[in-house]
Structure formats: structure tokens, C-alpha cells
Amino acid sequence: MVDAAPRPTVLPPAQVAAQRSVRCRSGRVMSELGGDSDAELVGRVAQRSEDALAELYQRHAAAIFGLARRVTNDRQAAEEVTQTVFLQLWSHPERYDPARGAVRSWLLAQTHGRSVDVVRAETARRRRQERDAELSAVPPSAEVETAVHAAALAEDVRRAVDALPPGERDAILLAYFGGHSYRETAQLLDQPEGTVKSRIRTALVKLRHTLASEGVTP
Amino acid sequence: MTPDTHPHDDLAVYALDALEPEERAAVDAHLATCAACREELDGYQRTLGRMTVPEEPPDEVWAGISEQIRATVAAETPAASATSTSATSDGARPAEVVSLESRRRPGWLRSPRVLAAAAAVVLVLGAGAVLVSMRGSDSLRDQAVAAADDPDNTVVSLTSDSGEVARVVVADGEDYVLFDDLPTLSPDETYQLWRTDDGLPTSLGVLGDAEDGAAKVALPPSTSAFAISQEPKGGSTSPTDVVATGQLA
């Protein structure tokens, strides 16, 4: 349990920003917490600052919701994942370890993990239904098509992903956006598990270099 | 090639949440001691962070978050957190912890039903309650029943739509879950215990398939609201299918 003084209301982030806003150089409206780093805001969340949580929400909720939507392919599930990620941050801000990297990466990793949980639970439910109804599963090739082509990507990322050899591209998209384990990915692609693992790594390293060389900052 | 003990391939797969659980645990253990791999993982995660097209969530997402924060802050005031010693429960459901879901669908508090087996196993995050599942031990059930009968201990009744199906025995470090009327699960499923006092359910550990009629758990202090869910083997980070709930009255 956390000690905290009760507060009567929590303003939506937009209102928080509007109430105490300044306009930064880019014209974006920012709250007075706008100058704080993400890590500093997490520290304030640990001190039960709802304004700090609201500011973090403003900065990262769209990326979190976008990722959750892509992985779950379900708008409502994505809303729930987004809520859960921020409520976990509120309940357990100490779980963020600055030594492990940026707040945004960490939040997105939480988001991805939760989204994958949703997908796997849904898959389990569907398998049960299919067993009951004696339906055949979706053919693997159709699932590969869906996962690979449903992935909406930013233009520069799309170019980088399209530049990968198909085997690497399919492996990373199936695992990341399809929520498949590498074993499932190997089955879907009919490739050895070790090959899929090393393809995933090769693909990630290539994407990292391509995106970095384009001067894109995270 | 010089010998290289860093799990390079597994680290990349780890970043995608695509490792099998035992491999994930091995990478976790390695990361705890290897700064180079933490840095490599950070690089992968930054790259993956670029893969997503941002999309503004609807306003009700923040509304639900602020609502639940208010609920937890209210629950943390001294009056609301006063310890209760009563041992029964009407199975009241902590609707306030799931506002968004409960408004629009039953969500994780669905009525009990059998959940499919899942091949995928996920790591259990959440509260660090240590949990021992004892297979094939007749005495575990006996110990748990004895603990439940001890007047010094607190027993929380967990109910489903059909009445009491399980009990949580709060016995000062020797805590148990008694499966009174929950079906034994298939080998690829497990029950999981949750604390629902806070804004969202926190795992108190996986309970196994109920075959032994009881499971030993270690409950954190001042837990008063519980739920048992049915999960794929290995458990989940949030409840999939809640089969029973209960709290200290």
C-alpha cells in the first residue's frame, strides 16, 4: 500500500495542460511539467503525483495505444491494455529501472507483453471453440499473410522492413505484431526454430542500423 | 570465433516477447548481471518503439484511469483500510477496479466457464508471493483444512455464481487456498490467485490444477480482496477468466 493524501479529482490530461499551460517553441501546448524528463516524471508518480502521470499519458499514450491495437487487433482490448499499463505505472513506479533504458521503451515493452497475453488468451479460447465445433484452424499461410500485411508502419519504417529479406521480415512481423512465440513462428513459416531466432536478431540489428542511419531518433 | 556466453539471439527474441518461458527466465537471469546485454536489449527496444504508428486513444481511457486512481486513493485512506476480521464474504465483486471493462462488457469478471487450453505460457509478473504447489500430497489438503479450522486464522470464502467454491486461509505466513468445488483442470491450464484490493488485480501466484484440493501460498500483508482465475499453464499477467471472488466482509 502506498501512503497518499486523498485528492478530490483528477483532471484529464488535456485539461491539466490547458489549465497550466505554456506554449513551447514548437507550438505544442505543454503543462508546466513539460520540461521534466520522463524519468523525473516517473519519480513524481512514485510520490503520488497524478499530474505527472497525466503528463506521461500525454507523451506516450498514443504510442502505447497504437502498439496495443496493432498487436491485439481489437480496439477495446487495446484500450484496456493502455489503462492497465498506466495503472501499473501508478501502482508500481519502482519497477521502472533507469539503468534498463528509456521510460518510453519500457512502457512499450510492458504494452507489448500485455498485448501478447491478450492475444494468447484469445487464441486459447478460439482453439477450444474450434475443437468443440470440430472446425479446422486457419491455414498457416493465411495467418502469415494477415500478420505481415496488417502491420501499418510509419513510412520510413515500412521502407526499412520491406528492404529485409522476406524470411527475416515475416519472422519479425509474426513474432512482434502477431504475438507468436518463436516456436509458433517457426511452425507458421515452416523453418527450423534456430533459424527463426537468428533471423529475428538479424532483422532487428538491420532495422536498428537503417533507422539510425536515416537520422531517426526514437 | 571466440567463445561468447551472451545470449544474442535469445535477447532479440526476448525483446519481441517471443521466447518460451524457461528461456525467458534464463535471459532475465543473465540480464541481471550483464550490462552489455542490458544495453543491447535497450537498443532493440528503442528500435521496436519506432515500429508503431501512434494513435490517440479515446478520452474514456484516461477517464477510466483517473477514476481508478481516485478509487485506490480513497481506499488508501485510514478509514477505508481499517482491518476487518470477519471471515465471510458474499462474493461481492470489486467493480471499481475494472471500470472501463465493466461498463462495456463483463471483462475479466466473466461468469465462470471452462477456458481453453493454451500452449503458450507466459511469465507471471506481479506481487512476489512465493508459492509452492505440492503434487500428490494428501497431507497438504489436511494441513489446509486444519489451518481453516484453527480459530486464530482468518478464512475468506470465494464464491462463484453457484456458491462457495474455494477458501483462502490467512494463517500468518502459512497461508492456503482450499479448492472446495472447483474442477480439476487439464495439464495445460492452471488456477491463479489475485489480489484485487488495488486499482487492478495483482498476481499472488499460480495455484496449479486443483487436483490436490489445496495449494500453499504466501500472502502479502493486508490483502483482503481475492479472485481466482483460470489461466493457460504458467499463468498470466492479468486475469483471463475469473472463476471465483471474495473478500473480508
Image: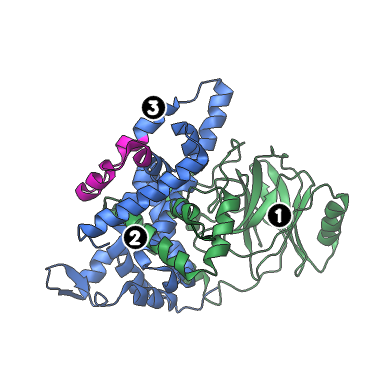
- What tint does the image give chain B? green
User: x, y percentage for residue B35?
Assistant: 47, 70
Stretch in magenta: A147-170
**Amino acid type of disc 2?**
Arg
Name the side, left or right, on which B10 lies relative to A26: right
The dot on residue B46 is 2
Tag 1 residue: B157
User: x, y percentage for residue A209?
Assistant: 29, 56
| Quarter-of-image position of residue B3 | bottom right
Mark 2 — on which chain does it sit? Answer: B
User: x, y percentage for residue B45?
Assistant: 38, 58
Secondary structure under the numbered disc 2 in the rendered image: helix
Mark 3 — on which chain does it sit? Answer: A
**Amino acid type of disc 3?**
Ala
Identify which residue is drawn at 35% across, 54% down: A205
| Quarter-of-image position of residue B113 | top right
